[in-house]
C-alpha cells in the first residue's frame, strides 16, 4: 500500500489513494497504520481522491482510532497539497466534498500554503448537536472534576466545545479534554478547545481532538475557536490562532463563514508492508 505523509504545523496525516488499495481500509488497519510505535504514525488518514459528480474531488477522513471525521481543516490543506504534488490541481480554486460539507480550496506558493473556505460556523444546539432545548450554545457551564468551566459549542461540519480560559496548557487539555469529549450532553462526542484571548487579533488554543487525542494544531478547531471569540465580541474578524505547532490565519465574516490559510509541509512517500496488520496492537 503506497502512502504519502505531510504535516500542517505539526498535525500529521497519511494520504492513501483509493487506486492503491484493493479494498476499503478497515478500522483495525487504520489503527495499525496510525500507531506511533507499531505503524507509520499519524493523526489520521486522508483517503482520496474519490471520484464524485458533485465536486472536483471527494475525501474521507479517518481518525487514529478507526472512526471517521466529518471535516478537518488541516487535513484539507494537506489533501490540497497532495493534489498539487500529483499535478491534479493548479493554482486555481477547486472544490472538495467531505462528509461535513463541500469546501473550496486554493493552493499558493507552490503548495506550501493553502487557503480553505471552511463553510459557516453555527452555534445551533440541534446542528452541533448538544442535548437540551434548541438554542445557541453560548456562555454555558460545564462541571468537570468539581470545577465550573464556561464554554460555547459550535459546528463547522463537526462538533466543537470551546472552553474560555485565563491561561491554557497541554496538561489541562490532556487531562480534561477526554472527559469533555465524551460528556453526555454531546451525543456525537466533541472536539475540545481551551482558548485564551491574547488581544483583538490573536487567540491561543490547546486542543483535544475527538477520536485522535491531544494534537499540536487543528484547522477546524482554529475555525471554531475564532468564531466563538468573534461571536463574544472579544476579537475582530481577522484572527491569528496560536497553537503549539504554529499559527493559522482565520477570517470570520459577518455570517460566520470561515476563511482559513496555513502552511503545509511534505514529509515523504513510502510503501506500507502488509506485515504490520498481522500483529495485534497492545
Image: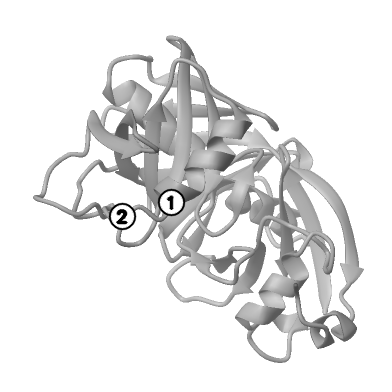
To which quarter of the image does residue 64 belong?
bottom right
Judged from the image, the secondary structure of the residue bearing numbered disc 2 is loop
Which secondary structure, mark 1?
Answer: helix
Q: Position of residue 10 (x, y in %)?
A: 73, 40
Q: Which residue is mark 1?
A: 181
Residue closest to the eye, 215 or 238: 215
Circle 2 Cα neighbour tier, 10 Å, few/some/many (<14 / 14–19 / ≥20): many
Q: Depth check: 94 or 237 in front?
A: 237
> Is residue 252 something that shows in the picture?
no
Q: Is residue 219 left or right of residue 246?
A: left
Residue 114 lies left or right of residue 223; in this view the side is: right
Spatial CA span between label 2 and label 1 = 8 Å
Residue 186: image tag: 2
Q: Quadrant of residue 33?
A: bottom right
Residue 234 position, x and y percent, is: 34, 14
Q: Is residue 214 above or below residue 248?
A: below
Q: Is residue 228 left or right of residue 48?
A: left
Q: Quadrant of the N terminus?
A: bottom right
Q: Is residue 50 in view from this perspective?
A: yes
Residue in the picture at 72% in, 82% down: 19
User: Going 54% across and 32% down the picture, which residue do you hit?
Assistant: 172
Give the residue drawn at x 54%, y 44%. 208
Q: Are marks 2 and 1 in contact (CB under 8 Å)?
A: yes
Sequence-wise, which precedes: disc 2 or disc 1?
Answer: 1
Res 255 → quadrant: top left
Q: Nearer the viewer, residue 59 or 155?
A: 155
Amino acid at each position: 500500500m503506497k502512502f504519502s505523509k505531510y504535516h500542517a504545523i505539526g498535525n500529521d496525516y497519511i494520504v492513501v489513494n483509493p487506486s492503491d488499495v484493493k479494498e476499503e481500509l478497515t478500522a483495525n488497519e487504520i489503527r495499525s497504520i496510525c500507531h506511533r510505535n507499531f505503524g507509520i504514525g499519524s493523526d489520521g488518514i486522508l483517503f482520496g481522491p474519490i471520484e464524485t459528480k458533485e465536486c472536483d474531488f471527494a475525501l474521507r477522513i479517518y481518525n487514529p482510532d478507526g472512526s471517521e471525521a466529518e471535516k478537518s481543516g488541516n487535513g484539507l490543506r494537506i489533501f490540497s497539497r497532495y493534489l498539487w504534488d500529483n499535478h491534479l490541481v493548479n493554482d486555481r480554486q477547486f472544490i472538495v466534498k467531505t462528509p461535513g460539507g463541500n469546501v473550496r480550496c486554493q493552493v499558493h506558493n507552490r503548495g506550501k500554503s493553502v487557503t480553505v473556505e471552511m463553510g459557516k460556523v453555527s452555534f445551533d444546539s440541534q446542528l452541533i448537536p448538544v442535548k437540551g432545548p434548541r438554542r445557541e450554545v453560548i456562555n454555558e457551564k460545564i462541571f468537570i472534576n468539581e470545577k465550573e468551566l464556561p464554554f460555547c459549542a459550535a459546528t463547522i461540519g463537526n462538533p466543537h466545545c470551546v472552553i474560555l480560559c485565563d491561561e491554557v496548557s497541554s496538561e489541562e487539555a490532556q487531562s480534561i479534554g477526554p472527559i469533555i469529549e465524551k460528556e453526555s450532553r454531546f451525543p456525537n462526542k466533541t472536539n475540545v478547545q481551551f482558548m485564551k484571548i491574547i488581544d483583538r487579533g490573536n487567540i491561543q488554543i490547546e486542543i483535544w481532538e475527538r477520536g485522535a487525542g491531544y494534537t499540536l494544531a487543528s484547522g477546524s478547531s482554529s475555525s471554531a475557536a475564532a468564531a466563538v471569540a468573534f461571536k463574544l465580541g472579544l476579537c475582530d474578524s481577522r484572527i491569528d490562532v496560536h497553537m503549539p505547532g504554529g499559527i493559522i490565519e482565520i477570517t470570520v465574516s459577518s455570517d460566520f463563514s470561515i476563511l482559513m490559510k496555513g502552511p503545509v509541509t511534505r514529509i515523504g512517500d513510502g510503501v506500507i508492508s502488509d506485515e504490520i496488520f498481522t500483529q495485534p496492537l497492545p
